[in-house]
Image (cartoon, rainbow, N blue to C red):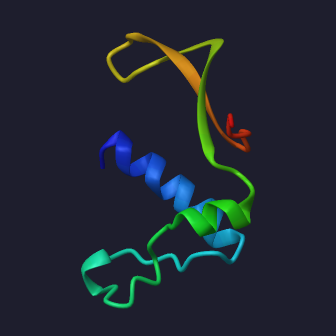
Amino acid sequence: MGNEMLVSRWLKGQLAAAGLVLPVNNTLEDAGRQGMITKEMMEAYGCNTLVFSKTDQKSLDEDGQELDIWMLSFVAEEKAE
């Protein structure tokens, strides 16, 4: 599974836990689009921005390479008018 899939599953999990979207795993079987995330769902959840923040922490991968640790947050950001 690619990193983009991890982020999308995390995001969808947050919205599903809030009861805003169904946790559909196979989008091909979702003819009614019950698992599709919409702008209205994001507004109802109250968050509209993903923020990636680098931490001071490090981790080692399976080859012993040192990796930076990042934190993902889902926050509300006011629109500039």
Q: Nearer the viewer, residue 78 or 15?
A: 78
Q: Residue at x 63, y 48 (%)?
A: 48
Q: How many marks?
A: 0
In the displayed structure, does residue 64 sit left or right of residue 22?
left
In the displayed structure, does residue 66 sit left or right of residue 79?
left
Answer above or below: position of 34 versus 68: below
In the displayed structure, does residue 25 sit left or right of residue 49?
left
Residue 3 position in % (x across, y down): 37, 40
Residue 30 position in % (x across, y down): 34, 85
Residue 56 position in % (x across, y down): 66, 9
Answer above or below: position of 69 versus 50: above
Q: Residue furthest bottom?
A: 32
Q: Nearer the viewer, residue 59 or 3?
A: 3
Residue 25 position in % (x across, y down): 38, 74
Q: Residue furthest front?
A: 81
Q: Residue furthest left?
A: 28
Q: Nearer the viewer, residue 34 or 68?
A: 34
Q: Residue at x 43, y 78 (%)?
A: 24
Q: Residue at x 40, y 21 (%)?
A: 61
Answer above or below: position of 41 versus 66: below
Quarter of the C terminus within the rendering: top right
Q: Residue at x 47, y 46 (%)?
A: 7
